[in-house]
Image: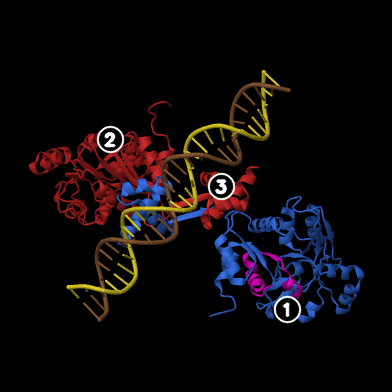
Chain colours: A red, B blue, C yellow, D brown
DNA sequence: CTAGCGGCTGCTCATCTGAGCAATCAACCA
DNA sequence: TGGTTGATTGCTCAGATGAGCAGCCGCTAG
C-alpha cells in the first residue's frame, strides 16, 4: 500500500519534473485524478524522493539560517553550502563581504578585527561597497614577526574600498607586562582609537582557535605552550584576542588584562556584530560565540551550522 | 552582467525552492518584476543551478530512455538510475519484471531465454503478473553440471506466476557434434518446442559476455579456452547462446550450427523482443544488440545507457 | 543621422496549481 | 449493530504561473 503509493509518487515525479507534463496529463496517464497527482508530488517532495538542490558556490541554506536565528536569538544568519572542490573559507569570506555590502542601515563607523578570514573578506569586498565609512581596528595587531601589517592592512583595505577612512590601532595585541599595557592605553593615540572603537555602529570579526595553529602563536604573541595551557584551562578559542571557555568567560584574567582592544562586554552590547567563521576546527569557539550572545549575525558554512544546531544550547525556557 | 544575473538566479531559486515564496513575493524582495523572476527560475533550471533529482531505486531516466529510442530506433527503453549501495542487477531485473507485467497487448506466448539476469527477473515477477500466458524456452539449457534446472526453472517460474503453461526445451544449449544436434532437432519434442518458440508474440532475454565468466563456461558447454578463442575472433558476447561480433554477425559458424535454439533472424523479425542487461562487463554486447536490431525494447542501467549513447552508432543519415 | 535588428522587459490572457471543504470510506470500539 | 473517528477522495475557487506579444533599448551598418 505504502509501496504502491511510493511507486506512484516516483512515476508522477518523473513525468512532472523530468518530462514536464502537467498534472492533468499525468493524471490521465496514470489513471488518477489531477488532485491526487498534486498530492503525490507534494508527498514526493516532502519524503525526499524528489530532491531539489541549488548548486552554486554563492547559494545559501535558508532553513538552517532560520534555525540558527531561532535557536540562538540572532538577528540574521548566512549559511553557505558545503561545495565539493571549492574553497570553503573563500566562499564564507565572500558571503561575509556580500553581507557587509548589503547591510542596512549602512554603518557610519565599522569596527573590525583581523586574521586570515577577515583578510580574505577584505580582499573580496567589491570596490565601492559603501561610501565614506570609517573603519576602526578594534584589537591590537602590530605583528612581532616579519609579515607585518596584515592587521592594519585589513582595516585599510576595507576602508579604501568604501572611499572611507581607516583608523589603525597602533599597538601590539598582547603586551608582556601589565604596566606597559596600561601605559599604551593611556597614550592619546591608542586611547582615542579605543574610545572610537567602542562607539562603532557595527562590528565585524572572526575567531581563533586555542591550539598552536592560533594566529597569535603565529604572530609571536603567545608560545605554543601558552596556548596549550589556555586549552587545559578550558579555553576553546579567542575573540578579538581574548580567550574564552564554552560559557563565554575569559579564561586567563591576567592575560586578558594584558590584551589591548575592545572588550567582550562592549561587543555584547553592540547592536550589530557580524561573526564570520568557517571550518571544523572552529566549531567549539563558534558555539561559544553564538550561545553567549557575542554576535548578532553569523556568517558560516553548512557543517558549522549543523554542528551548532546539533548540540543543544544552554536551555533557556522549558527543558 | 552574466554574473549579476547568475546571482539573481541563485537568490530567486533559494527563495522559490527553499523558502517557497511566490514569484510575486520574490520579485518584490529582489526589486524586479515577477515575470523576470519566472524567467530567472527557468534559466536557473536549464543552466543546472537548480538540480531536481528523483532519488529512488525504481526511478527511471526518461531523457536517457528517449535518447536510446531515438538513437537506435527502439520501441521502448527503460533506464534505471545508478543507486549507490543498491544491487544494480536486482534493480534492473525488477524493472524488467515491471515492464513485462505492464506490457500491452499481453503476449499470448512469451519466449524466454535463461541466465542469471532472467532468473532474478523471474523471482521478482509478482504472482499473477498475467493470466494464462504460455512461456516457451527459446534456447537449450539442460545443464551439464550439478546446479541443473535453472534454465527450465526460469521459464516455469514465469509461467507459474501467471497461472500459465511452461514449455521447456529439453536439450543442451550446445552439442558436441553436428549430427547429434540435427538428431535432437528432428526429435518431435524438441522440434515442436522450437516451432512454437518461433511463433511467440514476445521475447525476453539477456546476453552473456565472451569471457571465461560466461554462463556457458560455468555450465560446462564451453571451456575457457573456447571462449578466449571466440573473443580473439571478435566475439563480444552471446545472445540466446549464439556469439556475435560488434556488427551482429555470428562469430563461429560451426559452433553456431551446433547451438540449439531460436536463431537471431527470428529474434530480429519479432515484433517485441525485450533485452534486459546490466553491468559494465556487458556494455560491448549490449551495444552489439541494440545497434543491430536484435531487440525492440531495452531494460538497463544508467551507466550502460550512457555507454551506448557515447560511442556513435553506425551512421545512418548525415554524418 | 537613422533605419534595421536582436535581445530584453513588462503586459494580457489562458492555463495550471494548491488551499480548503464536504462527502465517502474504512476501521475500530462500545 | 451502530456510532465515532481519522484518512482519503473529488471538488470549488482564488491565486500562481507560463506562453506569447508588443514596446523599448542599444547596437551597427549604411
The span shown in magenta is B265-293
Counting labels gives 3
The reply to whether the C-beta atoms of the residues labelled 2 and 1 are less than 8 Å apart is: no
Q: Residue furthest left?
A: A188
Q: Write the residue at 84% across / 63% down.
A: B168
Whether residue B163 sits left or right of residue A192 in the image: it is: right
Q: Residue at label 2?
A: A250
**Tags 2 and 3 on a common chain:** yes
Q: Is residue A240 above or below residue B93?
A: above
Whether residue B253 sits left or right of residue B87 in the image: it is: right
Distance from Cα at disc 1 to Cα at disc 3: 51 Å
Q: Residue at label 3?
A: A34
Q: Write the residue at 28% across / 46% down.
A: A206
Residue B250's tag is 1
The reply to whether the C-beta atoms of the residues labelled 1 and 3 are less than 8 Å apart is: no
Residue B100 within the magenta-colored segment of the rendering: no
The reply to whether the C-beta atoms of the residues labelled 2 and 3 are less than 8 Å apart is: no
Amino acid at each position: 500500500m505504502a509501496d504502491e503509493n511510493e511507486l506512484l509518487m516516483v512515476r508522477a515525479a518523473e513525468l512532472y519534473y523530468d518530462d514536464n507534463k502537467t498534472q492533468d496529463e499525468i493524471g490521465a496517464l496514470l489513471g488518477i485524478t489531477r488532485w491526487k497527482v498534486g498530492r503525490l508530488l507534494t508527498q514526493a517532495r516532502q519524503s525526499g524522493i524528489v530532491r531539489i538542490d541549488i548548486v552554486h558556490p554563492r547559494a545559501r541554506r535558508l532553513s538552517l539560517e532560520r534555525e540558527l536565528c531561532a535557536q540562538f536569538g540572532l538577528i540574521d544568519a548566512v549559511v553557505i553550502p558545503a561545495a565539493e572542490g571549492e574553497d570553503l573559507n573563500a566562499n564564507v569570506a565572500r558571503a561575509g563581504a556580500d553581507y557587509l555590502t548589503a547591510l542596512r542601515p549602512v554603518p557610519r563607523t565599522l569596527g573590525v578585527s583581523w586574521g586570515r578570514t577577515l583578510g580574505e573578506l577584505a580582499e573580496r569586498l567589491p570596490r565601492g561597497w559603501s561610501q565614506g565609512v570609517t573603519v576602526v581596528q578594534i584589537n591590537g595587531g602590530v605583528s612581532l614577526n616579519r609579515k607585518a601589517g596584515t592587521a592594519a592592512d585589513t582595516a585599510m583595505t576595507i576602508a579604501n574600498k568604501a572611499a572611507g577612512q581607516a583608523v589603525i590601532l597602533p599597538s601590539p595585541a598582547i603586551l608582556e607586562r601589565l604596566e606597559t599595557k596600561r601605559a599604551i592605553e593611556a597614550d592619546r593615540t591608542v586611547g582615542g582609537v579605543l574610545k572610537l572603537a567602542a562607539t562603532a555602529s557595527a562590528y565585524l570579526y572572526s575567531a581563533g582557535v586555542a591550539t598552536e595553529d592560533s594566529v597569535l602563536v603565529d604572530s609571536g604573541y603567545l608560545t605554543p605552550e601558552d596556548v596549550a595551557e589556555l586549552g587545559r584551562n578550558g579555553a576553546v578559542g579567542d575573540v578579538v584576542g581574548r580567550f574564552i571557555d564554552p560559557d563565554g568567560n575569559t579564561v586567563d584574567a591576567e592575560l586578558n588584562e594584558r590584551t589591548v582592544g575592545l572588550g567582550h562586554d562592549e561587543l555584547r552590547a553592540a547592536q550589530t556584530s557580524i561573526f564570520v567563521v568557517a571550518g571544523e576546527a572552529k566549531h567549539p569557539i563558534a558555539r561559544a560565540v553564538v550561545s553567549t550572545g557575542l554576535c548578532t549575525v553569523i556568517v558560516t558554512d553548512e557543517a558549522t551550522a549543523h554542528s551548532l544546531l546539533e548540540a543543544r544550547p544552554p536551555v533557556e525556557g522549558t527543558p
